[in-house]
Structures are given as structure tokens and as C-alpha cells.
Amino acid sequence: MEIDKQVTVNGLTFVPYLTRDKIAEQIKRVASEIRNDLKDSSPVFICVLNGAFMFAADLYREIGINDSVITFVKYSSYEGTSTTGKVKEVIGLKEDIEGKDVVIIEDIVDTGLTAVKMIEDLKQRNPKSVRFATLLHKPESSKTGFIPDYTAFSIPPKFIIGYGLDLDGKVRNLKDIYIIREE
Ligand code: 5GP
């Protein structure tokens, strides 16, 4: 399968960073960790829209626990390529998670502000446990010290796109992950 050598969006150029094969390989690893931890439970998976939709679809199928549910929430803190620092809940959780093992599925942990806010919100609903799975983690950008329970890739603090991650709503369709080109 061909991988574009570079992608230009809104005047910014991105180069290939993580291929679809590497992504699939790491999703298998994370899925098996989650399956081992939760195979005797009836977990609730919560996909954080929009960015995590593609990762969640692949991860959830790979985990393969039939006695589980997946649902969706939406938080917002980014405009363009930088965080606004304020995290807003845009679509809230409808499911009852009381007494349940919950796994949040996120695309990327950057400052950690969204993760911390979500976990705080969810804990108000008395789940049995809350775990956090992320496709990408930028440890050097952390403003919270938050460390996800499951991480597919740790990456440097640079802007990336593709495989669900956008730039102003665009390029979520890319099958591989691209990183911003240093001039
Ligand atoms: P945090 O609250 O951890 O600072 O940011 C989390 C959210 O910021 C992610 O869910 C994602 O929407 C956005 N974000 C952070 N870094 C990147 C990046 O490199 N690329 C894209 N497309 N979004 C990012």
C-alpha cells in the first residue's frame, strides 16, 4: 500500500511518522493488555470524539470482549494546532456506569488536561474503576503529570495528524500518522 511522502494542509507540511502496520501492531499489544485486565468483567468503553473514533473502532474489535459496551463522549480544547487550555464537555455520557469497569479511549494525551477532567467527571458517577487507553502520549507536554494506563506510542511534543487526528477538522481519513515537518 502506498504511503504519501508528504501531506500539506492549511499551508503546513507533514511527513510520514507511524505507518498503518506499526499502528496495527501496537493496537494488538494494547488490546491484549486490556483483555487480560478485564476479561472477567463487563466493561464500558468510552470513546472520546472526534479524534479517537478510528483508534477506538480498531482497538474495540481487537479487544474482543463480547460482554462489553462502547459509547461516545466529546470534549473540546483545541483550535488549530494549539490547546486553548480550557476543556469543554460537548457531548455528555448517557450510560449508567455505576459499579462498572470503565475504559476511556482517547487519541492523544498532550497536556493531560482533558484526561484529568474526564476522569474527575466520570468518578462522580461511582464506577468500579476507571482506566485510560491512548493511541499517543506526549509526556514532555504534560501539565498534569497524568500517565495513561495503556499507551500505544509515546511521542515527542510535535503536532501530528492522520488516523483520526485532524487539523481544523481535516485529514482524519489518512491511514498513517504524519508529523509536522521542521523547516
Ligand atoms: P490535552 O487536553 O491532553 O492537552 O489534549 C488532548 C486533545 O488535544 C486531544 O484529544 C486532541 O484532540 C488534541 N491534540 C493534542 N495534540 C495533538 C496533535 O498533535 N495533533 C492533533 N491533531 N490533535 C492534538
Image (cartoon, rainbow, N blue to C red):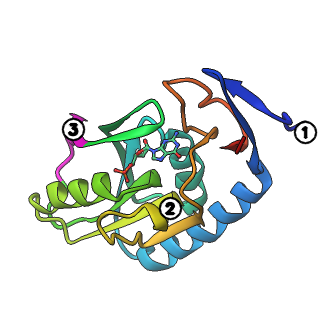
Instruction: Please say whether residue 130 is visible from this viewpoint.
Output: yes
Against 127, is 167 above or below? above
Q: Which residue is mark 2?
A: 137
Is residue 64 or residue 141 the one in the foreground? 141
Residue plotted at (75% across, 30% down) = 7
Please state if 22 lies on the left or on the right of 4 as rendered.
Answer: left
Q: Quadrant of the N terminus?
A: top right
Identify the residue under disc 3. Answer: 88
Image point (62%, 27%), residue name: 171
Quadrant hosting residue 148: bottom left
Q: Quadrant of the C terminus?
A: top right
Say whether residue 87 is magenta. Answer: yes
Near mark 2 (Cα within 10 A), the count class, few <14, some 14-19 or many ≥20, is: many
Expressed as whole percent of the image width and height from the top left, the position of residue 169 reads: 50, 24
Q: Is mark 1 within 8 Å of ligand 1?
A: no
User: Which residues lie in the magenta part?
Assistant: 86-96
Specify the quadrant of the image occupied by residue 42: bottom left
Q: Give the distance between the C-alpha atoms of the residues marked 1 and 2, in whole angstroms.
A: 27 Å
Residue placed most toward the observer, 175 or 8? 8
Quote the CA–CA distance across marks 2 and 3.
20 Å
Which residue, given by chain and number where applicable, does mark 1 sit on?
A: 1
Of pointers 1 and 2, the one earlier in the residue sequence: 1
Q: Is 95 left or right of 10, judged from the image as shown?
A: left
Front: mark 1 or 2 = 2
Q: Residues within 10 Å of mark 1 (few under 14, many from 20)?
A: few
Question: Please, what is the three-letter code of the amino acid marked with disc 3?
Answer: Lys
Residue 82 in the image, given as x and y percentages of width and height: 42, 39
Q: Amino acid at mark 2?
A: His
**Mark 2 element type:** strand
Compare residues 82 and 97 and report the one nearer the observer. 82
